[in-house]
Amino acid sequence: MVNNKETGNDEFKSASNYMPRAEAIVRQIINKFIYPAAVVLRGNPKSNWKEPTPEMIRQFACELPGIINWTLQKARINGMPIPLLPNRPLTESQMQAAEELFNNVDSLLIENETTGKKLCAVLNKITNTTVVLTDRKEIVVL
């Protein structure tokens, strides 16, 4: 990772590190969010579900900000849309936050205050906005 002192933006030294990490995030999104949603919507997990091919995973990884946006918008945590990521490769800090979110959160449902606060912290890092947990355990974007 290179830290650009002039702009304060962090960037990857090479794309070779980006794609494997992006593909791993895509697999987490598919396994934890998209596949369970397909099971619920279709009733029978075997009926229409097709395991994504490596080519599909690579394609999704190339469009990672859009896939994250889609996942968070589908969740619409307590009805609040989450700010969209710009359609460009994630910065190192956004990548780390996305890895943290999709590796450690099994669903985007807020079960308790601790989960809600952790989720807010990660969403703040990914979206560069202020996302807070209210007293009623609702996530709101300020």
Image: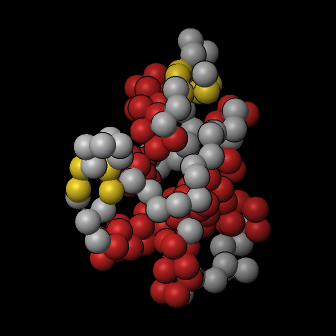
Q: Quadrant of residue 137?
A: top right
Where residue 141 appears, x then y in whole percent?
61, 27
Residue 35 position (above or below residue 93) = below
Where residue 81 appears, x then y in whole percent?
69, 38
Q: Furthest residue to the front?
A: 6
> Left or right of 114: which side holds 58?
right
Q: Furthest residue to the right?
A: 42
Which colour scheme appears in the figure?
secondary structure
Q: Residue at x 26, y 65 (%)?
A: 13
Residues 141 and 102: in front is: 141
Residues 83 and 76: in front is: 83
Residues 121 and 30: in front is: 121
State how many labels appear.
Answer: 0
Q: Quadrant of the N terminus?
A: bottom left
Where residue 105 appears, x then y in whole percent?
44, 46
Where residue 109 appears, x then y in whole percent?
57, 38
Residue 130 position (above or below residue 87) = above
Can residue 100 be seen here? no
Residue 36 position (above or below residue 81) = below
Q: Quadrant of the C terminus?
A: top right
Can residue 4 be seen here? yes
Q: Furthest residue to the top?
A: 135
Q: Quadrant of residue 80?
A: top right
Q: Residue at x 34, y 73 (%)?
A: 15
